[in-house]
Image (cartoon, grey):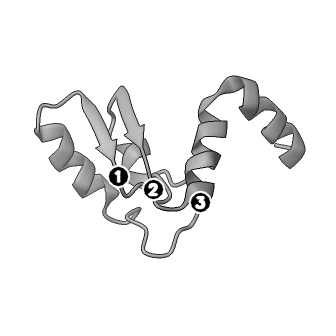
Amino acid sequence: MISLIPYIGGKHRISGVVAGHLRASGCDTLVDVFGGSAAVTLNAGFTKRIYNDADGDLVNLFRVIADPATRAPLLHRLRW
């Protein structure tokens, strides 16, 4: 399963199981209020995703990554 960053207490090991249950719900939007490393958000296969976390730095990271205008400078700085 895809996980952008390692995260203590992360759900990356169980994200496939969690994602399967979420897809079975029939909903078209995933709202992940305890997003963490976004392992579930990235692997659930929803086209509409809302990510949140108590850690504002993580939320900001995913905002930067989601926006092509801010993602490119970040990747350049990281020499990706």
Closest to the camera, between mark 2 and mark 3, is: 2
Classify 10 Å Cα crowding around label 3: few (below 14), some (14-19), many (20 and above): few
Q: In the image, what residue occupies the spot 35% across and 27% down?
A: 48
Cβ atoms at labels 2 and 3 below 8 Å apart: no
Q: Residue under label 1, please give it.
A: 33
Residue 41 versus residue 34 in the image, above or below: above
Closest to the camera, between mark 3 and mark 1, is: 1
Measured Cα–Cα span from mark 2 to mark 3: 14 Å
Q: Residue under label 2, please give it.
A: 53
Residue 43 versus residue 39 in the image, above or below: above
Mark 3 and mark 1 lie on one chain; the one further toward the N terminus is 3
User: In this rendering, would 76 be left or right of 32?
Assistant: right
Q: In the image, what residue occupies the spot 59% across and 32% down?
A: 66
Residue 72 position, x and y percent, is 78, 30
Residue type at the position of mark 3: Ile
Question: Extreme left residue here?
Answer: 25
User: In this rendering, would 32 be left or right of 79?
Assistant: left
